[in-house]
Amino acid sequence: MNSPRIPFYDSRSPGLRRRGFLAAAGGVTGLGALTVTGCAGSGPAGEGDGKPRRGGRLRAAFAGGGASETLDPHLANLFADAARAKALFDKLADYGAGLSARPRLAAAWEPGAGLDRWKVTLREAVFHDGRPVTAEDVLYSYRRIADPGRAFRAKASLEPIDLAASRALDPRTVEFVLKRPTAEFPNVLAAFGAYIVPRGAQDFDGEPVGSGPFRFVSFAPGRSAVFRRNEDYWDGAPYLDEVEFVVANEESARINALLGGQVEYAHELNPATARAHEGKGHVQVVRLRNSVMQSFAMKTDRPPFDDRRVREAFFLMADRRELVDGALSGTGEIGNDLFGKGYEYYAADLPQREQDLDRAKALLRQAGAERLKVTLDTSPVAAGFTEAASIFRDQAAKAGVTVEIRTGGKDSYWRDILDSGTLCSYRSGAMPIEAHISQRLLTGSTTNATKWHHKDFDALYRQAQSTRDKRERAAVYARMQRRLYAEGGFLVWGFADWIIGTARAVRGVAAEAPANSLDWARFDKVWLA
């Protein structure tokens, strides 16, 4: 007998995933107080500044990926890619501000008694060419992502699904057959990059067709993309006539374009820039507290970091407070070598790791690496990267380690560091801890930057996913995190604020929307006053 139908989202009990996160950041009031000129509370920025109005083009500046950029939503990797994909396409579900799955193209789900079959009902929606979104489109999209010959971002997240056995029960109902019981299957539907495309679609750079709030107009890789309002959007037509995504890789170029009136939205400002302009009346500054993990990634499959003693030594070299104060201008929280501080399942009971140079030196001696030299790959591709690299170089020198900094280009940095090098600057936006594990820490994860390949760790993840009781599931995740804390490859030194700048006329920018969540870069809800 099947369990009763469960709605994706109940506003009376949203199931906050970032447990304690808003409290640590000063609560809702604290977040609102940090936004200037109309960004307040838990609603959209400027909610109290008049009724939303239709019309106009909003120009949004993002760092891009150069001439290799694509509109293929399954290849989305950069924040610019994700923002463009969100404008053109939909997922079955997406993460709310609390990182719980909320409905998008899926209206409801119904788990079977054994949690190994889930029935998903689609809402009535149409693609830009007028075709209805059907169960066959969903299955095609997921099977395309799972293609063993391709490296699509969401592949590892969709791994629990037996796509050969899954089927369309009718045009608006999909029965997903799973390889094992999966208690948190809605997170799979919300996975980063798991967009639904029309059956048979392959060419996304010519004239892509999605079901999202905007329709394609033009695309020049590495330069700009223009999309027009979709009047037939199932979630209500956007207020804007058009949105233009402009590529500006330099942070200085983004803020100068905003100040000069060339754009109305500047994505990812650094803390020093925000401090310089906050409260001056020229632009609005939106701070999303502690939204981004900041770290160094050690590749655990090659020397010197294939020796866990060397990895532990590097954990102990870091002065996390100095890194946060110096690289983030003090606007963030220190990390403890684990992703997801404040999120559900986070192992908050582990002791805060402190700098211990004597212990670090002893571990290096044991590993035969007393005069170790390593290259740290970094880039100005993200706020704080180059600053943190210089600070850590000086910290490591106190333990007798020579860190040589190699600065890579912005266009190719994320692609370059995935497989090459041994140590690099790394960051991550918000997602549930289980999604971080599935995308970055399993043997088959396509964005496994630390090359953490352990079959027993993979088995623990499957055990956690299959555990119905939440307390027992939390215990498995805690066990996995204890291992990562002891011998993992991510040296997580801090959690940074996510900072966005907008023109004073922009309204509707969500004030509580961590990067990667539903309301981040959601331009269908933005308007120009």
Image (cartoon, rainbow, N blue to C red):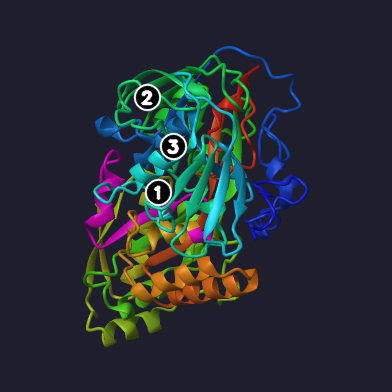
Front residue of this view, candidates 506 and 117: 117
- Circle 3 residue: 136
In the picture, the disc for residue 501 is none
Q: Where residue 212 sits in the image (x, y, percent)?
A: 50, 28
The amino acid at mark 1 is Ala
Query: From which residue to which does the magenta span run?
Result: 407-434
Q: How far apart are labels 2 and 3 at the CA level?
A: 18 Å
Q: Is residue 236 magenta?
A: no
- Circle 1 residue: 154
Judging from the image, what secondary structure is the residue with disc 1 in?
Answer: loop
Q: Tell whether label 2 touches label 1 (CB within 8 Å).
A: no
Q: How far apart are labels 3 and 1 at the CA level?
A: 19 Å
Residue 330 quadrant: bottom right
In the picture, the disc for residue 208 is 2
Residue at 60 percent across and 56 percent down: it is 111
Label total for image: 3
From the viewer's perspective, tell me whether residue 209 is left or right of residue 169: left
Front residue of this view, candidates 362 and 498: 498
Residue at 67 percent across and 33 percent down: it is 44
Front residue of this view, candidates 501 and 462: 462
Q: Where residue 342 sits in the image (x, y, percent)?
A: 61, 61
Q: Where residue 508 sits in the image (x, y, percent)?
A: 64, 28
Q: Is residue 261 visible?
A: no
The amino acid at mark 3 is Glu
The amino acid at mark 2 is Pro
Q: Quadrant of the C terminus?
A: top right
Position of residue 203 relative to residue 379, above or below, is above
The answer to which of marks 2 and 3 sits earlier in the sequence is: 3
Judging from the image, what secondary structure is the residue with disc 3 in?
Answer: helix
> How dense is the environment of label 3, judged by Cα within 10 Å: few (below 14), some, or many (20 and up)?
some
Judging from the image, what secondary structure is the residue with disc 2 in?
Answer: loop
Residue 36 quadrant: top right
